[in-house]
Image (spheres, helix red, strand yellow):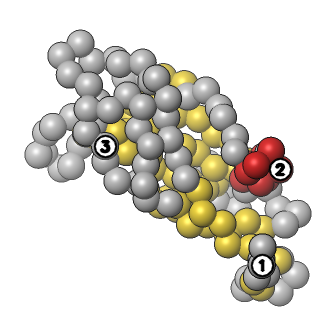
């Protein structure tokens, strides 16, 4: 396997591009009338402001699916020796055409280094139900 190291704007930071493939398994249906139409939004905590999250990417929506296996990969640079907290939000399209409104279905945060250090680069985490 060839890994190409890339220099960032900060000449001391070395990074490698990675692709995150996201899926959910047996998610709890919170809606009594239908199954959710889910998408995963991935955000990274801002380096200069710990209260700010910056969107890195999002998957496609999967209709009526409690075990989505998203095909859209999220591309991000993994920086060595720098913490990179990521937030994974599963959002549900509520079917409203007003302002593209979505409900946050479930969420979890983790460090990109945890994913990179995991066996086979696969990490399983529990999603937490979002407060309404």
Q: Mark 2 points at which residue?
A: 117
**Mark 2 Cα shell of 10 Å, populated few (<14), some (14-19), many (≥20):** few
Q: 13 or 114, which is in the foreground?
A: 114
Horizontal arrangement in the rendering, residue 35 relative to residue 110 (left or right): left
Q: In this view, does 36 lie above or below 45?
A: above
- Closer to viewer: mark 3 or mark 1: 1
Q: Residue 62: which numbered mark, if any?
A: 3
Q: Name the residue under label 1.
A: 2
N-terminal of the pair, mark 2 or mark 1, is 1
**Mark 1 Cα shell of 10 Å, populated few (<14), some (14-19), many (≥20):** few
N-terminal of the pair, mark 2 or mark 3, is 3
Q: What element carries label 3?
A: loop
Residue name at image x 87 percent, y 81 percent: 12
Residue name at image x 18 percent, y 16 percent: 33
Residue 77, horizontal then vertical, whole percent: 67, 69
**Mark 3 Cα shell of 10 Å, populated few (<14), some (14-19), many (≥20):** some
């Amino acid at each position: 396997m060839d890994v190409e190291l890339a220099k960032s704007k900060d000449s001391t930071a070395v990074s490698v591009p990675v692709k995150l493939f996201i899926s959910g398994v047996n998610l709890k249906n919170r809606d009594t009338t239908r199954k959710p139409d889910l998408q995963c939004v991935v955000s990274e905590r801002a380096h200069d402001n710990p209260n700010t999250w910056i969107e890195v990417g999002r998957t496609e929506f999967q209709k009526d699916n409690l075990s989505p296996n998203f095909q859209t990969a999220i591309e991000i640079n993994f920086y060595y020796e720098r913490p990179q907290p990521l937030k994974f939000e599963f959002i549900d399209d509520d079917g409203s055409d007003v302002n593209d409104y979505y409900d946050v279905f479930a969420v979890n945060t983790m460090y990109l280094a945890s994913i990179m250090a995991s066996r086979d680069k696969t990490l399983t985490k529990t999603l937490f139900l979002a407060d309404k």
